[in-house]
Image (tube, grey):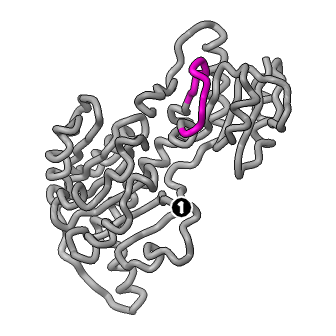
Amino acid sequence: MKITLCFTGLSPEPWVQGLRQALPEADVSAWQPGAAPADHALVWAPPQQFIDEQSQLQTLFNIGAGVDALLQLQLPASLKLVRLDDAGMSVQMAEYVCHAVIRHFREFDAYAADTQAGRWSFRKPRLRADFPVGVMGLGVLGERVAKALQVFEFPVNGFSRSPKDLPGIRCFSGPEGLGEFLAATRVLVNRMPLTPDTEDMLNKSTLSQLQPGGYVINVARGKHLVEQDLLDLLDQGHLAGATLDVFRTEPLPAEHAFWKHPKITLTPHTSARTLRDDSIAQIVGKIHALQRGEPVKGIVDALRGY
């Protein structure tokens, strides 16, 4: 069995060493143009040349949760594209979103500004019932986020493209349920996969349907958000603020308006980082299952985009 790794902007060597330890029977190496054909590949933003040369691949394992970039490539119909189910990312995502929600709800940014100015201040406690949180996208990570928010007793809504039933969470689905979901939500958490149907879905029309004083947390993809629409709604006062972890261009350009906007909190695409050891263990388990002819989770439907 031969395994190759093709990473753009990331060193593959620690992954090569980890896979060699976990699969001593396998021939594991980093890809170079013209390399011998492999059976399986681990990739992060590979070029089309890699796909074209590695024509005998059986499976392509993406080391991130989102596969939208891979679906822009020309992939053979026979190639299984497999995403990570979790690999330590869901707990990171849950803690990031809970932190962002609580930071906004408890007005910690305002308290920080007051203490910086030497002011001892007090704000009237807010009611959780007035801050329903809507999680848009109920995959593995989104569901974990929704369940984590329940611990803090926020009303939690969930939206997915197909119906779901999660205890204690008011679930909406499909195009017919989106408007009702948005109207029931004050704090919006975006965890949708990026597809042609979901690109630009966070726009003036959808965000205007949030309850007044709405707050946006984007931890999915930058292309979901129409940036100028967000800025306009913040400046008009319909939205109270936003926490953004993903952007259309990364790194975010130095001249971008987001950097200095007082109502926007930025982080550098760090809400849920891939954990190498957990990921390798999961991928090795999937390879073994495939060798035994067993089904594995995470196989991507190219037509749906996730």
Give percent across and percent down for residue 85.
Answer: 51, 32
Quarter placement of the C terminus: top left
Q: Is residue 157 left or right of residue 57?
A: left
Residue furthest bottom as drawn? 118
Quarter placement of the N terminus: top right
Q: Is residue 47 visible?
A: yes
Give percent across and percent down for residue 175.
Answer: 21, 39
- Residue drawn at 81 percent across, 42 percent down: 13
Position of 131 relative to 283 (above/below): below
Q: Is residue 35 left or right of residue 235?
A: right
Residue furthest top as drawn? 293
- Residue drawn at 25 percent across, 52 percent down: 133
Q: Is residue 19 magenta?
A: no
Position of 50 relative to 286 (above/below): below
Q: Is residue 60 left or right of residue 149?
A: right
Position of 115 relative to 276 (above/below): below
In the rendered image, which residue does mark 1 sit on? 249
Front residue of this view, candidates 292 and 252? 252
- Residue drawn at 31 percent across, 88 percent down: 120
- Residue drawn at 38 percent across, 84 percent down: 113
Front residue of this view, candidates 194 and 275? 194
Quadrant of the rendered structure where residue 280 is?
A: top right
Secondary structure mostly seen in magenta is loop
Dot 1: element: loop
Q: Disc 1 marks which amino acid?
A: Thr
What span is in magenta?
Answer: 72-82
Give percent across and percent down for residue 291.
Answer: 66, 11
Front residue of this view, candidates 226 and 12? 226
Position of 99 relative to 262 (above/below): above
10 Å crowding of disc 1: few (<14), some (14-19), many (20+): few
Q: Is residue 276 visible?
A: no
Give percent across and percent down for residue 115.
Answer: 39, 85
